[in-house]
Image (tube, grey):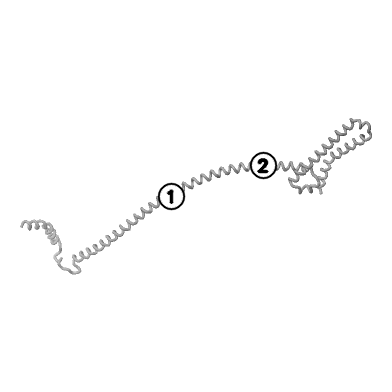
Amino acid sequence: QQKLQRNVSKYKTYEDYILKVIDNLPENYLEYSAESMVMSIIRKHETLGATNETLINNLSRLSDELEECQHSLESLHQEYDTTKLMINSRLSERRMECEEAKERNKRLEIKINLHRGNFIQQSEGLGALALAINNLADQCYMRHYGIYEEIGILAKLDMVKEFIVEKKDIVQMSAQMDSTSALVGTTDQIQEKPAETNQLVPQIKITFANSAKSVPNQKNRLKSTKAR
């Protein structure tokens, strides 16, 4: 009996709530026609239940999609960070290579300027040397070398050398002849043969004079060759 009383007291709250609901219901609430308020409430409840279920399903689906998007976003963030690190590393390497290339270019530019200056100096020196060789060759022209304009620079040097050697031999020969004539003039043989000595001296002088005249004659031949 005590158990029964406990159950009665336990469900007393529900009994009171049901009684209040019954009091608030209209008199014809037991009629189940299509127009009754209970059916409209039930249909509305069913509609709301179906809508709620649909919304719950949509919410679950959107939650799954959101979770997937979050995972994708995290993956993109990680990929972005990795790519950023790689790009920064490559950029740093390219900057170092660029700096090294700039340094190499500066060194090459300095070297080129030095070579250019040396080349200009060498060109000026070679030009001056060629001009001097041409001037000497112009003064030492020898006919058997051919036309002057067609003679190469090495051939001109050979011609100048040959001209100088020839004139040196002439001068040495003239000096020897002068010394010989002086020696002969002081000996007793010259006293015995004055006529022969008097004839030899003019011949030596004529030979020396002819050798001295050969230089201007060669210049005249050069001028005539150029004029032709």
Q: Left or right: where does residue 192 sit relative to residue 75?
A: right
Query: Could you say which quadrant of the image residue 13 lies in?
Result: bottom left
Q: Left or right: where does residue 126 sit relative to residue 73?
A: right
The residue lying at 13 percent from left, 65 percent from top is: 27
Front one among 126 and 26: 126
Front one among 127 and 80: 127
Instruction: Name the amino acid, label 1.
Output: Met
Q: Left or right: where does residue 96 sit relative to residue 24?
A: right
Query: Could you say which quadrant of the image residue 10 lies in?
Result: bottom left
Q: On the image, numbered disc 1 is attached to which residue? A: 86
Q: Measured along the vertical axis of the image, is residue 207 above or below residue 10?
A: above
Q: On the image, numbered disc 2 is attached to which residue? A: 122
Front one among 16 and 221: 221
Q: What mark, if any, has residue 139 been given in the picture?
A: none
The residue lying at 47 percent from left, 47 percent from top is: 93
Callout 1: 10 Å neighbours few (<14), some, many (20+)?
few
Mark 2–mark 1 distance (CA, rounded to whole Å): 52 Å
Please state the horizontal and vertical placement of residue 12, each as a whole percent of the image: 10, 57
